Amino acid sequence: MSATPVLALRGVSKRFGAVQALTDVELEIHPGEVVALVGDNGAGKSTLVKTIAGVSPADEGTIEWEGRPVRVARPHDAQELGIATVYQDLALCDNLDVVGNLFLGGELFKRGVLDEVEMERRARELLSTLSIRIPSVRIPVASLSGGQRQTVAIARSLLGEPKVVVLDEPTAALGVEQTAQVLDLVERLRERGLGVILISHNMAEVREVSDRVAVLRLGRNNGTFTVADTTQEEIVSAITGATDNVVTRREARTTEVNQ
Amino acid sequence: MSTGTPAEPRETQHEEPRTDAGTAASGAATATVDPRLLVRQEGFKGYLTDLGRRLRTGELGSVPVIVGLIVIALVFQLQDSAFLSANNLNDLFVQSAGTGLIAVGIVFVLILGEIDLSVGSVSGMSAAVFAVLSVNQGMNEVLALILAVLTGMAAGAVHGFFFARIGVPAFVVTLAGLLGWNGLMLQILGASGTINLDDDGVVAQLTNHYFADKAAAMGLATVCVLAFLGFSLLDARRRKAADVPSRPLSEIVLRTVVLAVPAYAAAFVFNSYKGLPLAVVIFVGFVVVGDFVLRRTGYGRKVFAVGGSSEAASRAGINVSLIRISVYSIAGTMAAIGGLFLASQINAANQSSGAGSLLMNCIAAAVIGGTSLFGGRGKTWSALLGALVIQSINSGMALLGTGSAVRDMITGAVLLAAVVIDSVSRRTQKTAGRA
């Protein structure tokens, strides 16, 4: 793991009207590292993802890319830097085949005509380097399973050669076997030296694939843990804010009221 | 998961053995295949089994409409032997051109998952614009024709603008168009209500000109078949070179024969009457160009993407509004061109141009031909096949002397059957979703 994080958030705050969604959030992602972003509903995970993706820029704080402060004001800025975001609701076209979806918006042309052969070749190459199993690259995405669709959506984000991939609950709607497929893919992304931000509710899968866990609680950092030397209980109590200390519980409650 | 039989790499993704050190680049020699994957066998047998699987899982394509056409032809032929005469078949083809051209535009709109109810009125209006400009104002016919087509394009762009930018449902916008453009047509036709066109003019020739030379029909059929064969072979060679699945030679030959039989049959029929009709050349030309645009260009891919999921399309950087406006412009343009063909058939523009069952026939033609009402799926060829079905029913009923009452009921039943097939095949495709 290199010393400089590929992506770092420093003191990021975001306010929606009367709601302080994020307060002084810090986050670092190194190349070849999977960072799980966990937290209860409303903890600010999705807001943080939107900040990183440039969908809703932060009010305060800086984003550093490979050590340099950068501006991420639009989705285009994030893509330009090399941040690919795969949203929960997939964003695939059901009627197009796998090749069509992978290259949607970035089709290859030959003499002004779609170069289906080259697109199909590259699609097969990409899918096979990621060991993604799809019945055929020429069937409509509608006939794929949820897990296969999710892997196609992730593979699609990799065509732009990103350095950081943000996965927003990639396994939320998937069965056991399909979840395993997606987690395998996450590990392969790490092997390729990509930084991965994985948002998940599932502690077991967080512990399975991630190197570090960043906990958000009520829009603030509530600890970053190295998975190898942390118990599940520690992470869960950081998420829920439940500790064995009455004082901290009371403190949490008062900060909640103050917001 | 890694159990399975070694098989040809065709139509499969390689599954690397899952070892900790298993990097993606390891050899394909040890590749095993998930038994659930669709492994297509090499050669002609593989083509047949694949075809059978596709039919079973609901990818019916043009099969129902072709079966329907054959059934219709047989039924009418048994009732009246004049149905399959060269004369009748020729008229049937020529008269389907107007409806079919409008239906080509409808196919584009249906792929978007929308509807255009205004095409009948737009076709009547453009015919009226042409008649007024060329006959009443004495304008050059070609110029008047171009202006008439541009009128249709503009009308379509107006629909597209209100739908895409203002957010009015397409159904309502085009319903307003249905009324509004019809009113405008009546307005510009003026008091007389009927303007007769020049018998030897450009528009009159659209459906009345024939290439009498027998070489024309045969030559065109040959060019089409050879072009199809050539492009198929070229494509197969490129695919082989790129190591992606390609059609086997036997399949290419079969497909070419399937194309060649109707092409030469049509050429023979035309030659035994007056020769190759100009209307058919233009109609098929638009169908082929439309098919090329939809399947081979970036624009067509965007149209399908917006029809599949406008959300996904806009996230992929596609300008959804622009695509919608352009598709409605195409529908308006095709409506105008079709309107000129319909005017050519009666050699006049009158108050009933574009009225009556024309709109429903055009939409029915696209749907009967196999374009999905649910958006995201369709081909311009369905406009051709569907228009032939509708015109066959019209023509057969006219031969039998039954009135329009029975004809409309039968056309309605055929449309319903087409929509049922579409819905059922969609459901079958979903349940056959392989996972």
Image (spheres, coloured by chain):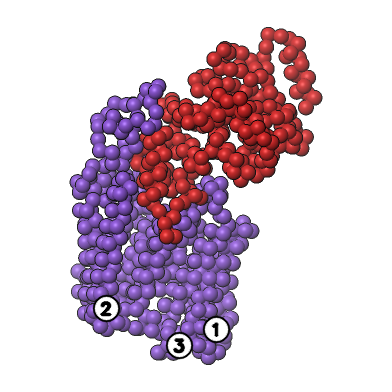
- Residue B198 location (% of width, % of height): 44, 90
- Chain B rendered in what hue? purple
Q: Which residue type does callout 3 highlight? A: Leu
- Name the residue tied to disc 1: B189
Chain of the residue on which disc 1 is drawn = B
Chain of the residue on which disc 3 is drawn = B
Q: Is residue B3 above or below residue A120?
A: above
Residue A225 appears left or right of B86: right
Q: Which residue type does callout 1 highlight? A: Leu
Q: Nearer the viewer, residue B132 or A208?
A: A208
Q: Residue at x 45, y 65 (%)?
A: B105
- Name the residue tied to disc 3: B197
Say few, some or many: other residues with alpha carbon within 10 Å of mark 3 (under 14 / 14 to 19 / 20 or more): many
Foreground: disc 3 or disc 1: 3
Task: Answer with mark 3 or mark 2, whichever residue precedes in sequence.
Answer: 3
Q: Which mark is residue A147?
A: none
Q: Quadrant of the C terminus of chain B?
A: top left
Q: Quadrant of the N terminus of chain B?
A: top left
